[in-house]
Amino acid sequence: MKNVLVIGSTGQIGSELTMKLRGMIPEGNIVAGYIPGAEPKGALLESGPAEVADVLNGAQLAEIVKKYNIDTVYNLAALLSAVAESKPLLAWRIQMDGLINILEIAREQGCAVFTPSSIGSFGPNTPRVGTPQDTIQRPKSMYGVTKVATELLSDYYFSKYGVDTRSVRFPGLISYTTLPGGGTTDYAVDIYYSAVKGEEFTCPLNPGTFMDMMYMPDALKAAVDIMDADPSRLIHRNSFNIASMSFDPEIIYKKICEHVPGFKMKYVNDPVRQKIADSWPDRMDDSCAREEWDWKPSYDLEAMTVDMLENLRKKLNLA
Ligand code: SER
């Protein structure tokens, strides 16, 4: 990786991945791709090139790839699961029309492509605990449908055209820099904001709703390491299960209470999110990622909680 286009650079993953890549590859062009209305600001804008990069505009993307001699595209444009249920056609267009635009450019101009998949690519008849790498994927949400199709299309472009597509199935991602928008796992970010602000948290999911979760530094490491992995070791490509922690609302609430005594939480169920969460795994088996490219996370719930609380207090100027 030297010249990289990050599409969706102002989103939850993109905003941090772009900065990480700029730090790692100072001699390269790490282009922050964005859409009008979601412009980069501050350090993201000042530390490197930025270009309007709409996944639905193939000609525009091709121009950027040519201009900066891009070798790797991180395709992070997507509607998350809950918002995709309210706008299924738009989710399909962004996720699928966008992907094929990128894959075609990658085929023509020889780029590697990372398009994340998710725990959302699984469905209610997938084994929930120790979810295997290769298993039943019959999701019921539009988000999940697009993620399975993304995995298949990415593998197709690799086997048919040799496009270097690789990716991971992200768990719910927790971070303090940029908020996620419209996902099912967002509660696990929002709960920390409530805790540091001294507010009661309203949890949209029932107690006992377990899902895989991950702290952003581990997710970024996975996104970089999979693209740097030795291709001769890769048996799988799109996409690898990766896991680091699994909890339900009670467990994260109790963990935060250890650090924020008196923190309060109540449950007000969101049926759309609950239905989605109930169809996702409790905990994925990530042994293929560990064997094929040495995946290993660093953060557990305790380490993440300490870091989230400290950094959110700084960010929000709360002593
Ligand atoms: N975090 C995503 C969501 O909740 C799943 O990958 O939609």
Image (cartoon, rainbow, N blue to C red):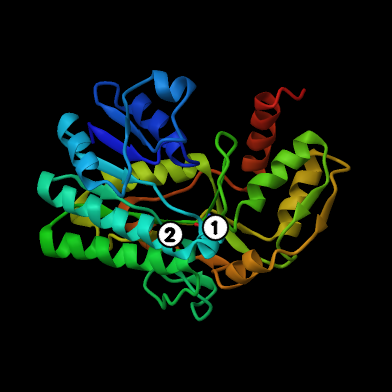
Q: Residue at x 39, y 48 (%)?
A: 77
Estimate the spatial distance between the alpha carbons at disc 1 and disc 2, rounded to whole Å.
8 Å
Q: Residue at x 60, y 47 (%)?
A: 300
Q: Quadrant of the C terminus?
A: top right
- In the image, what residue type sits under mark 2? Ala
Q: Quadrant of residue 69?
A: top left
Going by the image, does 142 lie left or right of 225? right
Q: List x then y, in percent, for residue 215.
A: 55, 44
In the image, residue 139 sits, relative to residue 4, either above or below, namely: below
Secondary element type, mark 2: helix
Q: Quadrant of residue 256?
A: top right
Q: List x then y, in percent, for residue 210.
A: 64, 65
Farthest bottom residue in view:
125
Of 182 and 93, the residue lying toward us: 93
Please say if the residues under marks 1 and 2 sit with CB atoms less than 8 Å apart: yes
Res. 79 visible in picture? yes
Of 50 and 110, the residue lying toward us: 50
- In the image, what residue type sits under mark 1? Val
Res. 70 visible in picture? no
Q: List x then y, in percent, for residue 91.
A: 43, 59
Query: Badge 2: few (under 14), some or many (20 or more) residues near its Cα, within 10 Å?
Result: many
Residue marked by disc 1: 83
Residue 91 is labelled as: 2
Q: Quadrant of residue 175?
A: top right
Farthest top residue in view:
46
Q: Quadrant of the N terminus?
A: top left
